[in-house]
Image: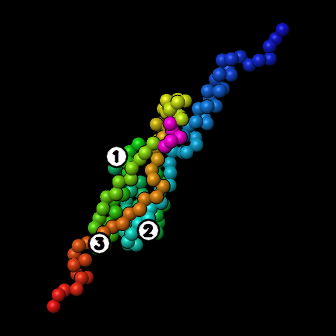
Amino acid sequence: MRSNHIPQKILALFVLLGQGIVGCASMTQGTSQIITFDITPPSSQCLVIGKGGINLGKVTPFENLLTVPKGKSNLTATCSAEHYQSDDILIKSSAQPIAMASILLDFGITDMLTGAMWSYPNKVEIVLNPNKSIIQETQPQPP
């Protein structure tokens, strides 16, 4: 008599593959993300630099969305505006909670390799300070 049951090894393989696909941050969260920049003053522009000094793009108060690849390394936004102090802003990478599930399934190897395990803040606020010389010029001088 022939059995209609699927062999246990094949069934186990399908279960493991199914769990891997469902659990991977690579599949559910992607390997890149969009960061929104809220930048002051209106004349500012920031150059966003990634791992190894790679230029990821320029943002301004009016063109303030940037798609970046996810990864463990932090990003740096180097910002400047006329009559304002330049500043380097650190954009920190952190592990996503969903990636913890993939650690249980495949030790997180896929998500670590693709960068999907990590994410940056969705919104970065940057405020540049006026140059001190500008502040002194605008203050009234005593008679």
> What is the three-letter code of the residue carrying label 2?
Pro
Please identify the quadrant where the C terminus is shown. bottom left
Q: Is residue 123 magenta?
A: no
Q: CA distance from mark 3 to mark 1?
A: 30 Å
Which secondary structure lies at badge 3?
A: loop
Q: Residue at x 36, y 66 (%)?
A: 127
Q: Which residue is mark 2?
A: 61
Q: Position of residue 130 (x, y in %)?
A: 29, 72
Q: CA distance from mark 2 to mark 1?
A: 26 Å
Which secondary structure lies at badge 1?
A: helix
**Furthest residue toward top:** 1
Nearer mark to the viewer, of 2 and 3:
3
Q: Residue at x 25, y 82 (%)?
A: 138
**133 with respect to 43 (left or right):** left
> What is the three-letter code of the residue carrying label 1?
Gly
**Furthest residue toward left:** 143
Q: Earlier in the sequence, mark 2 or mark 3?
A: 2
Q: Position of residue 129 (x, y in %)?
A: 30, 69
**Furthest residue toward bottom:** 143
- Observer able to see residue 60: no
Which secondary structure lies at badge 2?
A: loop
Q: Position of residue 118 (x, y in %)?
A: 46, 43
